[in-house]
Amino acid sequence: MAQPPLRADRPLVGERTAPRAAGVGRGAPDPVDELNIPSPPPEIARPPVQKKRRGLWLRRFVGFVFAVGLIGVVVGGIAAYGLWRAATADLPDHNWLADYQPPQMSRIYAADSRLMAEMALERRVFVPIGAIPRRLQQAFVSAEDQRFWDHHGVDPIGILRAAITNLEQLGSGRRAGGASTITQQVAKNMLVGADRTLMRKVREAILATRLEAAMSKERILEIYLNEIFLGAQAYGVAAAAQNYFNKGLDELSIAEMAFLAALPKAPNNYNPARYPEAAKARRDWVLDRMAEDGVITREEADAGKRELIQFRGRARPDMVAHGQYFTEEVRRELTQRFGPEQTTMGGLVVRTSMDPRLQLVVEQTLRTHLMNYDRRRGGWRGPVARISAASAEWMPALEGVTRVPGMLPDWRLAVVLEVRDREARLGWAERPAPRAPAQPREARLHFEDVSGWARPVRDGRMGGAPRRMADVVAVGDVVMVETQPASRGRPERLALRQIPQVEGAIVALDPSTGRVLAMSGGFNFERSWFNRATQAMRQPGSSFKPFVYVTALEQGIPPNQMLLDGPFELQTAQGVWRPTNYGGGAGQGMVTMRQAIERSLNLVTVRLAQEVGIDKVADTARRFGVMPNMPHLLSMALGAGETTVMRMAAGYAAFANGGRAVEPTVIDSVQDRFGRVVWRSEARRCVGCDAEPTAGPPQLNDTRRVAVDPIAAYQMVSLLQGVVQRGTGVRAGQGLNRPVAGKTGTTNDQYDNWFVGFTPDIVVAVWVGFDDPHSLGEGETGGGNAAPIFNEVVAAALEGSPPVPFRAPPGVALVRIPAGRDTILEAFRPGTETAARPPMAGGYGGGGGGGRSSGPATAAAVDSGLGGLY
């Protein structure tokens, strides 16, 4: 091999060279020379100084990078620890999810099991995981979290896959996809909220791992499937199946399951009614995922794709369309007993005592009689609005008139288009379907239908009867009308309507149990939620008198006792109190107790209350539940206190119930979401109901308190039967052909009209009056206004049932005694059976002195003129 040429700058072998090491001093002998070692060839000569310096800088750079990396690790660790502390500092406790039950709507049912109302903030039906079809579970897993059964709350593979997908779609304008597992979605929905921040994702991931450690996968999936919002006001798969397909979970097809699983991503964007193509595409994607996971076969997936998404919507169950006052009373009681949260979100199943058929009769009867009174006493108060009806475009103006609160469902607003002497032509807008365009309709209002009652009212005064149609309506008037169908060749015509100002209330209950069968608290619930049956405190007037008379009967005074009906005076610090009978007059002299209550004589009642003691009357009112805290004032004997329609019905029920106090109830039972009975109204215990059949029949222990002894209760029933047969309440029993008892009540100046009565099967209390108390008018009495309402309600309630007599208790003596031209069977307490009784002692003088009384009348009693109660 040829040698490289020698270069002048290279020393020859054996020549001295400059020192190469820093440790060799100048002039020092070269070790190589001393050892006589030849110098290496140029190819293996030591690197020059520049290379050594380069290596030094490299080592320094590596050290610097290592130091910076170490510092970064330390700082990053500190930052990560701080982030961890910040994320976990106020994390909610997740352990409660182990026993968590999603909010569910509560349902209220009538006595015939028809649905009355649903109470909920979110429409949700909870279904345990064992009742959710396995394929439906897996459909959501395939669509939302394919590795759900394998990961521990957070799926790293899913996160990486989502990151790659987001990078590929960068700049496309699409929303970045997430990688949240089902467990993370549960943590987000239930614990950390839905704000889109990095901290929320960190907290979500931490909670997800904790949830996986705290509960099973099945429990996590159960919460998810019952909590997830799926559009159409549906929370959870059960509610969604009803709202979209009107099916139960076990009735869903594979395609329908896949559609439900497609909804969590964007429920509103996949609504099949609005976006059918997007809904089908997403559904088909879920079917492919299910086939990939082996949940279904490829053939089933292809068949599912061919299936149309048939949106049926949730069919509402057969709901009771009336009884709003009853329903609201149930809601108030539930709120008081269980709290507002449990009432609206506890999934309660509430069974009430309401009879829907009787409830409808009660509402219709009350409305009819209130409107009849309004026509008789209220006159015509004019149109609700006025519009221009000159042009043919009157419909937009009419549709702009606000519907009057309190209008009945069959009423509508109509505009007067033309007025003639004996008729008027009216038009209104009618929609054949809820979303269909309005169509104009016209019909005639005839003068003979309004001439008898539509007297104009101006400044609170009623004018004379109208003489022509122009005295009632004018062109452009917007009035309330009700259509009368055509019949017997007569065309369709209109009836003029207005909402009455007078109000009323009715309660009908079972006297043996206290179950309220029907209740109406006013003319229309839409107009006023105020329940006059339970919330209005009104004077009962003479309908309170039976509690005075039963106090006397309980003390042994017989029903044929002679009592004085004469002038009565009581000196008070405010003046002299002089009650009178209805209609005035000086009294009828000596009368029996039966005659006094049948004729509703005030003077006899006051004297009797004074004789037995007003404190004992107050105690009777407390025991019957009519007035728990009645003032010990003699004027209270004439019904000057205040009570409610419900209390009066319950008080009279004790008479029909053999003297046992009755607690009115509107709820029979309440079950929780698991079907367990958490409350029941029945107070009687059944001893032996759990025993073997051979042990004999069980015994029912009646633990209800006794309001009055059975004999006195039956005597009072007999007296109240006379009120209906011969007294002030004759109209209450007309045509019923069965035993009926009851009492009228008319307060001073006809402010309140009452009738409270009963048969052995039902108690009905009726009140009529104004919300702002003022007179109903001269001659308007409980026997004329309230008793006919009672009659119609009882006739409807007992239609088809045989007459049942009132049951006499053991020990009562029934004696036939003369009563005018006839004889009656009078009930006596043993030892008091006599044909006649002398007047009671006690000084029934004109000044009222000598009798027993626990207190004088008040100044209010004097000022209000409590005489004249009927």
Image (tube, rainbow, N blue to C red):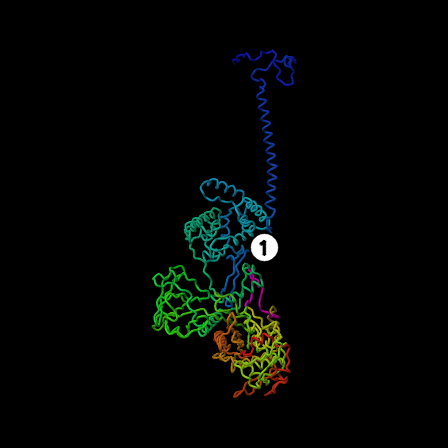
Q: Nearer the viewer, residue 265 or 366?
A: 366
Q: Is residue 522 magenta?
A: no
Q: Is residue 39 above or below residue 867?
A: above
- Which residue, given by chain and number where applicable, does mark 1 sit on? 99
Q: Is residue 124 above or below residue 573?
A: above
Q: Is residue 260 visible?
A: yes
Q: Nearer the viewer, residue 663 or 687?
A: 663
Q: List x then y, in percent, for residue 187.
A: 55, 49
Q: List x then y, in percent, for residue 512.
A: 56, 73
Q: Is residue 96 above or below residue 353?
A: above
Q: Is residue 757 visible?
A: no
Horizontally, residue 350 falls left or right of residue 426, namely: right
Q: Nearer the viewer, residue 476 or 671?
A: 476
- How crowded pointer 1 is (Cα within 10 Å; few <14, some 14-19, many 20+) is rated as few
Total numbered badges shown on the rendered structure: 1
The amino acid pointed to by label 1 is Asp
Q: List x then y, in percent, for residue 718.
A: 56, 81
Q: Is residue 683 magenta?
A: yes
> Is disc 1 placed on a helix, strand or loop?
helix
Q: List x then y, in percent, for residue 190.
A: 55, 51
Q: Is residue 827 above or below residue 684?
A: below
What is the span of residues highlighted in magenta in the rendered image?
666-688
